[in-house]
Image: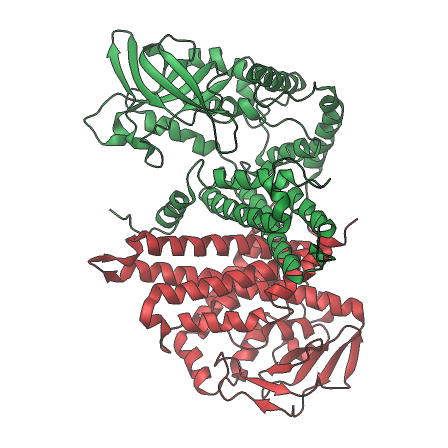
Chain colours: A red, B green
Amino acid sequence: MDFELTPDQASLQEAIRAFCDGRFLPDVVRAIEDAGGRLDRGRWRELGETGVFALRVPEDQGVGLGLGASEAVLVFEELGRALVPGPLVATELAARFAPAAVTGERIVGLVDAHDSLVVVEYPDDLDALLVIDGDAVRLVDAGALAGVDATRPLDALTPVRWVSDAPAGGETLGGPALAGDLRRTGRALTGALQLGIAARTVELANAYAKEREQFGRPIGSFQAVKHLIADMLVRSEVARAAVYAAACAIDGRSDDDPERAAAVAKVVAGEAALENSKACIQVHGGIGYTWELDVQRYWKRASVLDTHFGNRDECAQSIAVMVGTRG
Amino acid sequence: MDLRYTEEEQAFRAELRAWLVEAVPSLPAEPDPDDWDARRAYDTGWQRMLYDAGYAGINWPKEYGGRGATPTEHLIYIEESERARAPYIASNFVGQLHAGPTLIAEGSPEQKAEHLPAILRGDEIWCQGFSEPNAGSDLASLRTRAMRDGDEYVVSGQKIWTSYGHIADYCEMLVRTDFDVKKQAGITWLIVPMETPGIDTRPLRTMEGSTEFCEVFLDDVRIPVSNRVGEENDGWRVANVTLSFERGTAFVADVMETQELVRDLVDLARHVTSNGATKWDDAGVRRDLGRITAELDALWALTKRNISQAQRTGVVGVGGSVFKLAFTELRHRLGETAMLLLDRAGLSLDDFGNLPTGRHVQALYWALRMSIAAGTSQVQRNIVAERVLGLPRER
C-alpha cells in the first residue's frame, strides 16, 4: 500500500506546473477575459502538445501516452491551480475517440443530457460536443449552437449559452457502460481541477495574511484569521486524499469501488474548492472583491466546476443510494 | 500511487486473521464498565494473549521485544482487530503507546529492562500525569513541583484527566524542577510508582457517567532520582519524543467504528418512520448521510496517505493535526445528524423501539470528548496554522 507519488509521477506534475507557470500568468488570463472568454487556439494547441489530452489515450493509438487516471489527476490539479480556461475535462474524455482532440486541434465540449436546462460552455469555440445521456454517448459536430448567450456569465472566463435542446445526431460512441465510465472519470478529473483551486487558494490566503498588516500586526497572527486558513488547509488535504484515491480506484490500483470513490472525490473536492475560494476572498477583505485580483476568479471557477457531472448535492445523493441499497 | 497491499502485507493479514478467529472467542465476557479490578484483569489478560502470540508492541522495535511492524502492517493489525471485534487497547494505552516508546527512546538500560518487558506482557499498567487543573492547552505551565532532597525528589501538586489512574502501577509524570526559567525549560519526566505514600487518586465522573478519568493528588511524594527519565529540566523534550513514534495510525479504529456507525444509521433511517414514510424517503436525510459518507471515505483515504508518508519518511508530520481536526469535527456533524434522525429515541443511552439507537447517543458523547482531548480543535488549528503554514503566533 503506497499513496506516495512515484518519481515519474512527481516529475510529470512538476513539468506541467512549470508549463502553466509560464503560460497562464494572471495578465494572460485577464486578456482572455477581456476577449469575452474566447479561447486562444494557440495556447490550446500548446496544451495538446504538452500531452494534457493524450495521458490516458492508449499508446497503440499512436498519439497516446498510455497512462492512467492516477497521472491525469496530477496534471489536472495543476491546470486547476493555474486557472487554465476551457473544456479541459471534456476534451480529455473525448480524446480517445477523436485524435484531433489529442493534439489540441479540436476543442470538444460536453453536454450531460439529464439536465432539463442545457447550458453549453465555450459555445463559440467548440468543434465538437460530447453528449452523454443515460443510454448513449454521442460525438456531435458542434456547428452553430442556437440559443441564448449569457451577456454576463458568472465566470467571465467561462462563457455560457442556454440552448433549448441537446444537439441530436452525431456518431454514437457507446452505451450506458461508456456513459457511466465517462461520468465516473469526469468526476475524478473535475475533482482534480477543484483540488488545484482548493490548494492554490490556501497559498494565496496564507501569503496575504503574512503580508497584510492591521492593528500594527500581520492579520495572520490573529486566531480568527489563522483558524480560517488552517481549516482551508484541512479541506485541501482531505480533498487531495479523496481525489488521488479515486484515481487509484479507477486504475484498478485499490480495492475501492471506483463509482463511489469518484463521487466522493467530487463532493469533497467540490466543497473544498468552493469553501476555500470563499475564505480566500474573506481573508483578502475588500481587495479580494475587486476584479483585479485572481482570488475571486477561483471562486467563480469553483462555482462552474461544481455543476459538472452532478453537483455536490447530487453526488452526495448518489453516494447515499450506493450505501443505502447494500444488503 | 498504488493502494493495493503487497504479498507480504496480505500474508501478515492472513496470519493475524487466523489467530484472531481462534483468540477472540476464547475471551471471558466483557466486565462491567465500573468494575475496575475486573477491567484491569480483562485488559491485561488480552495483552498477555497478544504477547504470547507475538503481537504485543506491534510497532515497537524488535530489539525491545516488539513486533517491529511497518506502519502499513500496523494499519492491518488495527483493521483486523476491529473486524474480529478484539478488545480495545484500553488501559494498556499509555504503556503501549506513550510511556513505553518514551522509555525506548530516552530510558536508561535499567529502566528499559525493568519496565519494557513488563508492559509488553501486561504485567504493568501505566497512566499519564501531564495535565493539571491550570495546565490544559498550556501544558508547559504545569506547577506540580519536585524538590530535590538527596537521592530523592519530593513531589507535591495535582494532576487531572489521568485515565486509569486508579488501576495503574506507574505514572509517567511531568513535574516542575525549576520555577525560574522559561516554562518549558524547567520540567522533568519522572516514573512515579502509584503505590508510593502521599498519592491520593480520586475518580472523576464524566458527563457520560463513566469513571476512567482520575484526579491525582500528590503530597510530599518521595521518588528516587533514579526514576528520572532524561536529564533534570529536559522533560519537555522527553515528553515530545513520542511524537516521532506516531505513524498515522492513531485513529484507525475510530474511523472504522465510525464507518459502522454510518452504515447503522443508514439502516436505522430505513426503519424509522415519521408520518407514514421512512426517514430514508427524505432526500435531505439521504443527502446528509451521503455527504458524511463522502467525508468519511475521504478521511479513510487520508489515513492511508498519512501512513504511507510515515512508511516512506518515518514521520507523519502535521498530517496528524489535519486529520484529528477534520475527523472530530465530522463526528460532531454525524452525532447531530443522528440525533435529528433518532428524535425522541435519542433521549436514551439504552436502545429504544427495538432498534440499535443507544450507540448513536453514546457516539455523540465521544465527539464532544474528542474535539477537546489530546489537543482541542482550536489548539490543532493553531498547530496547523503556525507549524505548517508558518503564520505568526498571536503574542
Q: Is residue B334 above or below residue B313?
A: below
- Tell me the residue at 44%/54% (across/down): A231
* Residue A140 drawn at (x, y percent): 72, 84
Q: Is residue B364 above or below residue B192?
A: below
Count of numbered badges drawn on the protein:
0
- Tell me the residue at 76%/85% (across/down): A170
Judged left or right of residue A17, residue A48 is right
Question: In the depicted view, which residue is nearer to us: A102 or B210?
Answer: B210
* Residue A228 drawn at (x, y percent): 39, 56
* Residue A173 drawn at (x, y percent): 78, 76
Judged left or right of residue B273, residue A286 is left
Can residue A258 be seen?
no
Question: In the depicted view, which residue is nearer to us: A223 or B74?
Answer: A223
- Tell me the residue at 60%/46% (across/down): B300
* Rendering quarter of residue B22: top right
- Tell me the residue at 63%/38% (across/down): B359
Can residue B165 be seen?
yes
Judged left or right of residue B55, residue B156 is left
* Rendering quarter of residue B54: top right
Question: In the depicted view, which residue is nearer to us: B109 or B289?
Answer: B289
* Residue B59 drawn at (x, y percent): 56, 28
* Rendering quarter of residue A209: bottom left
